[in-house]
Image (cartoon, helix red, strand yellow):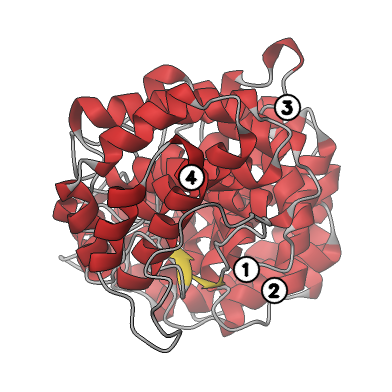
């Protein structure tokens, strides 16, 4: 049901997003969600909210706060130190990589991998190219299979693999793990994570690697993301095992987001995530858990809210989520925590979108019948300018709650009719928002003479007549405007 205008708007967002460097990092700045340079999957289709079959993915890829990727693991220096006579002030060089590989053997493999990881973090792409010349990925994978039981070597190996998969520009030519050798690396990683499930540093690096691979797979078909090998189950297990580790929770959410939203296997990953709670597994509850543990990290909370938004777009999954009352509370809390914070608009948008989906399937949505929460939605409409996407979701949430007349007293105390009417008039060029405001006004006046009088006393009637008379308005919007006028008669 998506309009051409909405598609063009979404494509414009993607074009703007793809100009931003995406997949994290040189390990000294921040973690980012990688945007596809091809096609984003957009939704929910706000122009047809009554359908429960819409998909999600608004513009994404928000920059994270600084994140330290280097696991704090004490490692004894073994037999090899690259260029030990070099002064500390001397810059790193790719020749150090040659020295590592010249001296690399079984006795110093763990420390050698750690040195290579540090060199990649310091030198970036040029270091990756030199490692590729030494067939470094193949050597690393062979070692991972041979030394699987050695936790120390596996820590260093995973950190090196993380450094190799991360990218500061997100370009396909920067992807090192491609083809058959990459498949072997992913399989070795998943077995390593399973073997050393209790070791936080390995789970942290593993989640980071899977995050990078899933996001890279969106525009590079030869990059494996481990979907067929059950990568998403491994991320869920890591997050469940290390509930109190904020770093595992943060990277775990990034991995789940990339797997479910950016990976070329996103639909399969969403289904796997939905099924991961069966037979006693932690399942989707790890999302709520991460929101609580990392509640002060805006990016983590936002990505978690977006995950809930896309998952709840499926009616069956929404009902499953509503089976756990804590889920709705976990989504509501960030609205209060971040509502006045700069840069949090996309989080608030995702939260209201998820709540609207959940409220739609809730038989007794008393948890949403909260005067302060409704006030926040109305406040968003009143004060958040030039953010039509947020207004659409806030309006959708109000529209769902308007079906329950027990909320009318709260609406009346905030003069919601005037607020939504003003939004409709101010954003006449935005079809999605026009449709949402008209739909919400229809819900508000049904069975309420007071709301009808409020609407008639506004300037709304002249605006409705203008919409009906406007040759540029779509037939759908004209029909909705006519229905609204008819309901007032």
Foreground label between 1 and 4: 4
Badge 4 marks a residue whose secondary structure is: helix
Q: In the image, what residue occupies the spot 55% across and 52% down?
A: 78
Q: What residue is drawn where x is 39% and y is 64%?
A: 82
Whole-percent x and y of residue 479? 33, 50
The residue sitting at the bottom extreme is 89
Number of numbered discs overlaid on the protein picture: 4
| Local crowd size for mark 1, using a 10 Å CA cut-off: few (<14), some (14–19), many (≥20) | many
Nearer the observer: mark 2 or 1; the answer is 1
Residue located at (16% from left, 66% from top) = 472
- Residue at the disc numbered 3: 282
Where is mark 1, residue-wise? 298
Q: How many neighbours does mark 3 have within 10 angstroms: few (below 14), some (14-19), or many (20 or more)? A: some
Q: Earlier in the sequence, mark 2 or mark 4?
A: 4
Q: Which residue is mark 2?
A: 338
Q: Which residue is mark 4?
A: 108
Sort mark 2 into few (<14), some (14-19) or many (20+) by Cα contacts within 10 Å.
some
Q: What is the C-alpha distance between the residues marked 4 and 3?
A: 38 Å
Name the element at disc 2.
Answer: helix
- How packed is label 4: few (under 14 Cα within 10 Å), some, or many (20 or more)? some
Q: Is residue 402 left or right of residue 346?
A: right
Q: Earlier in the sequence, mark 1 or mark 3?
A: 3
Disc 2 + disc 4, Cβ < 8 Å? no
Give the secondary structure at mark 3: loop
């Amino acid at each position: 049901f998506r309009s051409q205008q909405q598609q063009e708007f979404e494509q414009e967002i993607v074009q703007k997003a793809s100009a931003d460097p995406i997949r994290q990092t040189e390990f000294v700045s921040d973690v980012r969600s990688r945007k596809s340079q091809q096609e984003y999957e957009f939704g929910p289709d706000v122009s047809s909210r009554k359908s429960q079959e819409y998909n999600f993915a608004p513009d994404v890829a928000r920059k994270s706060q600084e994140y330290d990727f280097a696991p704090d693991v004490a490692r004894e220096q073994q037999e090899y130190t690259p260029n030990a006579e070099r002064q500390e002030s001397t810059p790193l060089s790719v020749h150090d990589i040659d020295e590592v590989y010249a001296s690399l053997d079984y006795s110093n493999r763990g420390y050698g991998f750690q040195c290579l990881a540090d060199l990649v973090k310091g030198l970036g792409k040029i270091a990756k190219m030199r490692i590729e010349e030494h067939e470094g990925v193949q050597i690393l994978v062979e070692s991972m299979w041979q030394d699987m039981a050695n936790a120390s070597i596996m820590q260093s190996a995973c950190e090196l693999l993380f450094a190799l998969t991360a990218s500061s520009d997100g370009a396909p030519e920067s992807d090192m793990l491609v083809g058959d050798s990459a498949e072997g690396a992913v399989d070795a990683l998943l077995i390593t994570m399973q073997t050393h499930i209790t070791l936080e540093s390995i789970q942290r690096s593993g989640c980071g690697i899977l995050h990078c691979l899933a996001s890279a797979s969106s525009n590079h078909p030869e990059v494996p993301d481990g979907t067929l090998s059950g990568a998403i189950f491994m991320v869920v297990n890591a997050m469940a095992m290390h509930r109190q580790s904020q770093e595992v929770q943060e990277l775990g959410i990034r991995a789940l987001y990339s797997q479910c939203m950016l990976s070329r296997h996103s639909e399969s990953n969403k289904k796997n995530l939905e099924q991961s709670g069966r037979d006693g597994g932690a399942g989707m509850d790890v999302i709520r858990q991460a929101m609580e543990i990392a509640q002060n990290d805006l990016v983590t909370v936002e990505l978690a809210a977006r995950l809930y938004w896309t998952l709840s777009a499926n009616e069956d999954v929404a009902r499953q989520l509503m089976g756990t009352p804590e889920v709705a509370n976990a989504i509501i809390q960030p609205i209060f925590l971040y509502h006045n914070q700069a840069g949090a608009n996309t989080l608030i948008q995702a939260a209201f979108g998820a709540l609207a989906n959940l409220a739609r399937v809730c038989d007794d949505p008393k948890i949403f019948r909260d005067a302060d929460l409704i006030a926040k939605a109305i406040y968003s409409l009143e004060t958040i300018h030039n953010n039509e996407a947020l207004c659409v979701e806030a309006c959708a949430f109000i529209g769902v709650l308007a079906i329950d007349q027990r909320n009318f007293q709260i609406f009346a105390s905030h003069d919601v009719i005037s607020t939504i009417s003003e939004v409709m008039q101010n954003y006449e060029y935005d079809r999605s928002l026009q449709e949402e405001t008209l739909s919400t006004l229809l819900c508000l006046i049904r069975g309420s003479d007071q709301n009808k009088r409020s609407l008639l006393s506004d300037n709304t009637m002249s605006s409705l007549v203008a919409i009906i008379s406007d040759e540029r308005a779509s037939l759908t919007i004209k029909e909705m405007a006519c229905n609204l006028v008819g309901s007032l008669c």
